[in-house]
Image (cartoon, coloured by chain):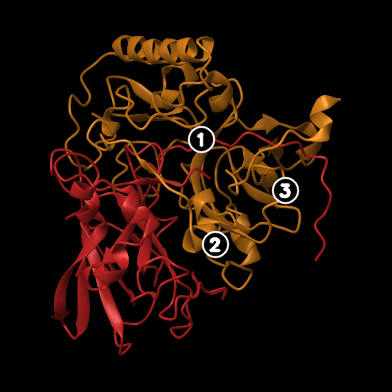
Chain colours: A red, B orange
Amino acid sequence: MTEPTTAQKPALQTPSQTVGPFYGYALPYVGGPELVPGYHPRAIRFHGTVTDGAGEPILDALLEIWQADESGALSRELGSIDRDGFTFTGFGRCATTIAGHYTFTTLKPGAAGAAAPYILVTVFARGVTHHLFTRAYFAEDSALHAADAVLSAVPGDRRDTLICVSEGVVGGAASYRFDIRVQGENETVFLDFDA
Amino acid sequence: MPHDIVSAPTRGSGHESQDSITIEIEAIEADAAARVAAGGSPELQPRRDYAPYRSSLLRHPTHELVRVDPEEVERLSPAFGHTDVNVLESDLTIQHAGEPIGERMTVSGRVLDGEGRPVRHQLIELWQANAGGRYVHKRDQHPAPLDPNFTGVGRAITGENGEYSFTTIKPGPYPWKNHVNAWRPAHIHFSLFGTAFTQRLITQMYFPGDPLFALDPIYQSIADADARARLVGQYDHSLSVPEFSLGYNWDIVLTGPKSTWMESEEDHD
């Protein structure tokens, strides 16, 4: 496929606006939080609570995750929306519950490139004017964390906010908790990729 | 009170007058303009800490975002395609047994990256209120009628040149509880993916000449007037279909992909 030559000049980006509270019939979809079925032998539970600056749960947040597969490869497969139950596409979407909680069923990613394995997490919510990016790393990969460029860029006393809490095997699956504190005490580190 | 959103408490919600909100809005816009006058760059994105929008008070990070380079995960994005989205999903007027009430319209345009290249074969999602300003959503209690023939949700995959087109009805403005007598200008929510996850965008398209613009703390959360004007679709008579629909054009420009921006030859013309 050839790149069409366009007369377009470099254009200024369209600004973000909040997702608002009323995306419910539009963005969440059946299977969105299940990147793999729960009965997959290596399914993991990736979950947590999203809280605001008062420590209250954010019950109208929408989270997206995007990650490598177990081998560290980024899927190029279609089917993130209309899932077939077998193809790992690496993308998931989940609205928080009235308790501010989210749960994804996925696979533990492999390291993509030189980085330590992580799940890219994007947070949208009413009151959040521009989405927030963060990364969820895994404590068991701590040997790789010292060399990770992003973790190294984060102040040491805030680095733990990017690392899932390992909860062992819960309900037959390895469970990882990644709470997201949008503001306040132990505020999650959010990333600007300067893109 | 209409439009009682079930939500986490928002500090100071609902009691201020429009006038006091407008004073806050104008002070922030003046601050942004002063920064530009002093040689700063215009603010291309909304402020996350934008007090006139009360819901942002407890929902913005207080720490600076940590600037890092995107790596492979961020430089790619999910592959969406025609197997994910039925072509009929771009027509919001044919989802029920009857025709929705309202002003039938099309909104079409192109999705481009920061260098003006088409963003092709990517997912674009949209949602909106009905002609009376009511969303099909259990938390929307605005006492305007639901329209049994309108859900207000559409999806499409962008074409070879980044193009998209939706057929819908024009949404109505609606009240909300940010402050007393707060009204949102009519808008359509859009969600977009680029070729890199760093290009992810959720935003809103507005309609030209809306008298509510100056009063709306969500629109005004983009403190730079030129930047927020990029959210306004343009009426284009050539896109109107005789005896059927009014046409609006709106091109959407995603960030990046990250690159060293160079002035092109054309800029020296």
Say what amino acid the circle numbered 3 marks.
Answer: Arg
Q: Give the residue pinned by disc 2.
A: B76
On what subunit does the disc labeled 3 rest?
B
The residue that mark 3 highlights is: B117
- In which quadrant is the N terminus of chain A drawn? bottom right
Percent position (x, y) of residue A94?
34, 62
SS category of the residue bearing label 2: loop
Report which quarter residue B247 is drawn in: top right
Q: Is B6 or B144 nearer to us in this picture?
A: B6
Mark 1 or mark 3: whose residue is earlier in sequence: 3
Give the chain of mark 1.
B
Kindly tell me whether residue B20 is visible in this rendering. Answer: yes
Instruction: Count numbered badges in the picture.
Output: 3
Residue A141, compared with residue B247, is above or below; it is: below
**Position of B58 compared to A73: left or right?**
left
The numbered mark 2 sits on a residue in which chain? Answer: B
Depth order, front residue of A164/B120:
A164
- Residues A147 and B29: in front is A147
Q: Is mark 1 on a helix, strand or loop?
A: strand
Expressed as whole percent of the image width and height from the top left, the position of residue A165 reads 17, 66
Q: Pointer 3: residues within 10 angstroms few (<14), some, or many (20+)?
A: many
Q: Of tags 1 and 3, which is closer to the observer? A: 3
Q: What whole-number distance in Å separates the C-alpha atoms at marks 2 and 1?
A: 30 Å
Residue type at tag 2: Leu
Spot occupied by residue B259 in the image (x, y as percentages of width and height): 62, 46
Q: Mark 1 points at which residue?
A: B187
Q: Earlier in the sequence, mark 2 or mark 3?
A: 2
